[in-house]
Amino acid sequence: MGDHSSRSATDPHASLRAALGAVVRGDVDFSASARALTTMDASNYRRVPLGVVAPRDADDVAAVLAVCREHGVPVVPRGGGTSVAGQATGEGIVLDFTRHMNAIVSVDAQTRTAVVQPGVVLDRLRTAAGAYGLTFGPDPSTHGRCTLGGMIGNNACGAHSVAWGTTADNVTALDVLTYDGERARLARGYEGLPQLLADGVRALVDGHLALLRTGFPTLPRRISGYALDALLPERRTDVARAFTGSEGTLGVLTEATVRLVRPPAARALAVLGYPDEGAAADAAHLLLPHRPLTVEGMSADLVGDAAADLPRGAAWLFVETGGDTPAEAAAGAAALCRAAAADGAVSGHAVVTDPAGQRALWRVREDAAGTATRLPDGSEAWPGWEDCAVPPERLGAYLREFRALLGRHGLRGAPYGHFADGCVHVRLDVDLLSAAGVRRYRAFSAEVAELVVAHGGSLSGEHGDGQARAELLPLMYGPRAVRLFERFKDLWDPAGGLNPGMVVRPYRLDENLRFDVLPRRPVPVEFTYPGDGGDFSTAVRRCVGVAKCRETEPVAGAGAGAGSGSGSGEGVMCPSYRVTRDERHSTRGRARLLHEMLAGELITDGWRSREVREALDLCLACKGCRSDCPAGVDMATYKAEFLHHHYAGRPRPAAHYTMGRLPLWLHLGAPATPLINELLSRPRPTALAKRLSGIAPERDLPRPASEPFTRWWRRRAQARKGDAGGRGRSTVVLWPDTFTNYFSPSVGRAAVAVLEDAGLRVVVPPKAVCCGLTWVSTGQLTQARAVLWRTLRVMAPALDAGLPVVGLEPSCTAALRTDLTELLPDDPRARRLASSARTFAQVLEERAPLWEPPRVDRPVAGQTHCHQHAVLGDAAERRLRERAGLGGELSGGCCGLAGDFGFTRGHYDVSVACAEEQLLPSLRQAPHGAEVLADGFSCRTQIAQLAGVRGRHLAEVLAEALASRTCGEGADEGVGGGTCHRGRK
């Protein structure tokens, strides 16, 4: 694997790559793409590795270490790359354990233990353990993508640490390899260590007993430094515990035996409101006698609009209780609320027992690592002083002084975190782009470290020291303990080959900042990026690396850490990664490559980059990241921007000329529709058309309807000339999108029937209009802008009249809401059209609130369109379905066709795999007689081609029911044709 073009005699790393390739059975990749993907984690730091190796087993790891020792190259173990302090980056060889060493070796329900490889994602372990009624207690908010190896490396904690402790509390035994290649089995006692290492560690401990007993603060969340006090004889010489949290600096983990716990059968959530975060912090530890599972704190500046659904207050504690039954859990939550209210500090409280309601509230907390990167006014905020911990009873006092310190430095942030453990997360609006800003950040870090120590705290309460805090460890531990850390590191790794610069002999906290390599001036772009000041670099910086796009496991249930509603069954992001499991195809991976493209160090050909183009090739432009990414990354827009520049002045792929300009060809070819369909019925012309058009040979080509919707509308209008029946009614404009107009005119006819039945007067633009979506998605932005400008000219009278515009195709409606104003920002008509665009259900709800839809009374299956999920929302559609008796849920995820994506040559297998992830299984499991709903043309096409089932737009289902209800009363032409439809299978 790798970039073969770079293998030349002048490559200084050719011998290293060759040596690794000769002995490693896993993947060895020195390509610019692989290196770019691992330059960063979720921190402020960036280090460029020489190469990436994905070992297959422990023997592979040993082989990598042997080669790297011979070449004097450092090694950095890496899991999910979600570390916030910089410890998952490095200059040497990065070991990626997520690709192959990701097995759950065993789960033992009797001993309540599991044996796992380091690359196992936490939620996979929780799912496997859940089959036995067990779980792994620590659950950081990244539970859907962080790995057990990374959790052990950082001593991760999560929201349930008040109940089940940190990762170190749940580790039984660890199999590791030292940089020298020695194998060790770490548990209690020195027996599993190589003899020389055992003797050295024993002597170090015996010689410093007093320091180990007095120099290490007693805190529930002391993560900073090495846990050398775990080696004290009174603590049973717990070598595994001392190793946990060492950030890959002592040895490379190859297998772990971890402890499992039995969670309560039911949970409830008590939400307590307080006048400010200090009052919430003062109260948090007082709730511990009630034995809660979690006590999480958030303030109003983080919660944002969600505060409307919370009890009165400016800060809140989310307190989870458990029980054998829902009633018992709810009773515990109610009792806790009463106790909290008794002290008079609570401004409001509520108990949430509904699992969906709990998930919605926990999502606010779990997404905080991403949402906190933007303050309410849009300012960027960064980690760094991310997760200190103080004694819980001192948290309120600490937060008040911390806020005062922020004010003195002119900084802002939104603290949140594990209040009952005294652990606070906060991202700050510090300027890390200028030298003056970096100096201020350095000065602030030193002062806040002194503040934490003054309160008896730890610089890190969860995420480790990494590069962000290791330099400040002398302030916390003093020089004697830090020298002891150095000696401990040297016993394990005398060559200093494992993750150098972390924990001991650290980099400065202001070195290796990932912002240093970015351009200081905005690059010329086509979109306006309104949330990022028009700066493409700022837009790309939105990706801070929390990696929610890497989640692949189903939602694990209600409660903190049990799923935020973004796993299988709900979210969309990121369909191609869910299929390939290749970092390049995650939203984060693509953002990383764009970052490196802007940096110009690894990826040197800018917008012409092959690496970026290949990574974006499998981006479905589903826009799922726009809503599902906590940081608001919009990769569909970035892709369109990139393609515009990449192909500027040179030939494009054939699919860009055919499917990218589909509205034009359909308009020009409309008079010849019979001939076109005749040709498409013949195998040879069809095969030739696919080959010339860049279309996948496996695909059936959809055939244009014999009569476009707009022609039907004009014929109908002509027949009704002089009919005054519509006068006095509220008028709406029905948007005749390309797909409805030429491929699914029945959807347009059905929408007219329903809207008119609801008492609305329907009008259609007098000339052709287009949202420009196909041009946008293929990066033909100059042409898209011209198409949109012509559309605005046609729509001007309707916009001047303030008429709502009803979109039937979700992708086109979403384009009007977003792409339109970002491509034509200075045209007031664009803003008016964007604000006027409504979905079919939205306009019925807003303009005909008293209308009663016909009762259909059937279960539903099918797909919510990605763009509907990401841009438009489907709340109105859900309510309309409920009123019509269409029960059940539609599939989440992505259908996999996604406009031109699934039709483009080379995408078919991924397209089908995306459909198999959620859509197709949901159709197979649908109850008999279920109505298959899919408002998007792509979704309906994918369903028809892969499942052999006809999916219908909600408008069609309602129109059929109306026709049945009025059977014999002259149903409108084209909407049931006057024929009663009593049901369908």
Image (spheres, helix red, strand yellow):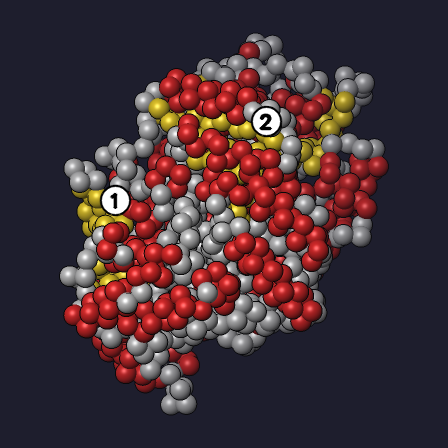
Q: Nearer the viewer, residue 173 or 983?
A: 173
Q: Quadrant of residue 769?
A: top right
Q: Quadrant of residue 251?
A: bottom left
Q: Which residue is mark 2?
A: 346
Query: SS for tag 2?
Result: loop
Residue type of the residue flagged with mark 2: Val
Q: Residue at x 80, y 37 (%)?
A: 799
Q: Is 449 above or below relative to 965?
A: below
* Sequence-earlier tag: 1 or 2: 1
Q: Nearer the viewer, residue 964 or 9?
A: 9
Numbered tag placed on residue 259 in the rendering = 1
Query: SS for tag 1?
Result: strand
Q: Residue at x 55, y 38 (%)?
A: 281
Residue 950: x %, y % from top left: 44, 32
Residue 153: x %, y % from top left: 35, 58
Q: Residue at x 69, y 24 (%)?
A: 846
In the picture, measured across the screen, residue 270 lies left or right of residue 930, that is: right
Mark-to-mark CA distance, 1 and 2? 37 Å
Q: Residue at x 48, y 32 (%)?
A: 286
